[in-house]
Image: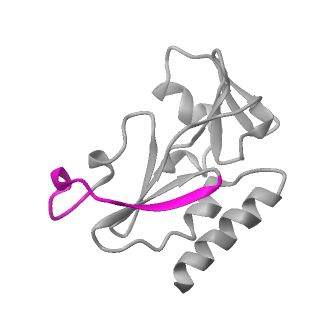
Amino acid sequence: MRKLLLAVATVIAVACHAQYRPLEVADSCACGQNEYCKVTPGRVACEPLPAACGARPTCACIGDRTDACRDYDGRLTLLPPRPVGGCEACAPEEICIDVGRPTCRVMPPDCENRPRCECVAPRAPRYRCDDHDGRVVLR
């Protein structure tokens, strides 16, 4: 019960701030051994691991290719992309894909501490990458 209250309090606290921070919300995940954590704005949920994941689940067995995923010592956290009104709504740890309706997507883990477009652009060759005040925008 304490873990559930902590997760709910974290979601509420994040929702009250001007900017949603998906990796901060992910820190509140406390799922069981046969579950993964799914983080969306306003919700942290423990979902059952698909049977296809087997005994040693990895990020490859949950979500789809548009989702970000983190493996914290065997604890999986799924961070799906989220549609937003504009790129300014994306957190620093997110990329804004501004094609049609803007969407925020959590950066690949190895790009979090590197120059943004330098790391992201080779993974998205069909997009133009721009750094805007520390925010990565793919168009």
Q: Is residue 134 above or below residue 131?
A: below
Q: Quadrant of residue 134?
A: top right
Q: How is the image coloured?
A: one colour
Magenta residues (range)? 42-57
Task: Say left or right for 17 vs 33.
Answer: right
Q: Percent x, y for residue 46? A: 42, 63
Q: Quadrant of residue 34?
A: bottom left
For this rendering, which residue is in front, 112 or 17? 17
What residue sits 30% from the left and 73% below the top? Answer: 33
What residue sits 72% from the left and 40% below the top? Answer: 90
Q: Percent x, y for residue 104? A: 63, 36
The quadrant in which the C terminus is found is top right
Q: Is residue 105 above or below residue 58?
A: above
For this rendering, which residue is in front, 121 or 87? 87
Q: Percent x, y for residue 87? A: 75, 31
Q: Percent x, y for residue 42? A: 65, 55
Furthest-bottom residue in this view: 2
Furthest-front residue in this view: 1
Q: Is residue 124 above or below residue 71?
A: above
The number of numbered badges drawn on the structure is 0
Please say whether residue 126 is one of the residues in the magenta stretch: no
What residue sits 54% from the left and 61% below the top? Answer: 44
Please say whether residue 50 is one of the residues in the magenta stretch: yes
What residue sits 51% from the left and 69% below the top? Answer: 29
For this rendering, which residue is in front, 103 or 137? 103
